[in-house]
Image (cartoon, rainbow, N blue to C red):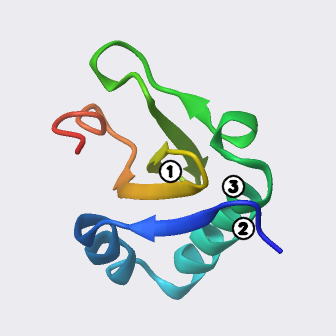
């Protein structure tokens, strides 16, 4: 039984739907780990204006997350490049 519930933003759902099946499975695997352990134990924190948000890395992509009491919110899924952290929700 997962410790945390997942909530997806519409932006994250759109990004997820555009991934290949292999990448979708990697996202699901990452999210299962996050649900069991929590973002603070599995993901890396972001800094400065993105404080309170976390990133989880997989295959050249980043899952951008936030966590409240018992809910992990998937904010976005982005390819890693120089603009990855611009305009993060």
- Quarter of the rendering occupied by the C terminus: top left
Check disc 3 and report its element: helix, strand or loop.
helix
- The residue sitting at the right extreme is 1
Up/down of 2 relative to 53, above or below: below
**Residue 31, image quadrant:** bottom right
- The residue sitting at the left extreme is 87
**Residue matched to label 2:** 32
- Residue 58 image point, x, y percent: 59, 54
- Residue 6 image point, x, y percent: 54, 67
**Residue 22, image quadrant:** bottom right
Q: Are marks 2 and 3 in contact (CB under 8 Å)?
A: yes
Up/down of 70 relative to 86, above or below: below
- The residue sitting at the front extreme is 69
**Residue matched to label 1:** 60
Image position of 5 (left or right of 51): right
Q: Earlier along the polypeptide chain: callout 2 or callout 1?
A: 2
Image position of 70 (left or right of 80): right
Residue 76 is marked as none
- The residue sitting at the top extreme is 48
**Residue 4, image quadrant:** bottom right
Q: CA distance from mark 2 to mark 1?
A: 19 Å
Residue 34 is marked as 3
């Amino acid at each position: 039984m997962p410790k945390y519930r997942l909530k997806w933003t519409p932006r994250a759902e759109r990004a997820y739907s555009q991934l290949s099946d292999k990448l979708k499975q990697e996202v699901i695997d990452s999210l299962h780990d996050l649900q069991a352990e929590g973002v603070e134990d599995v993901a890396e924190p972001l800094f400065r204006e993105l404080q309170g948000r976390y990133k989880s890395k997989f295959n050249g992509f980043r899952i951008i997350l936030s966590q409240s009491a018992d809910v992990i919110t998937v904010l976005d899924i982005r390819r890693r490049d120089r603009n990855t952290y611009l305009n993060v929700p």
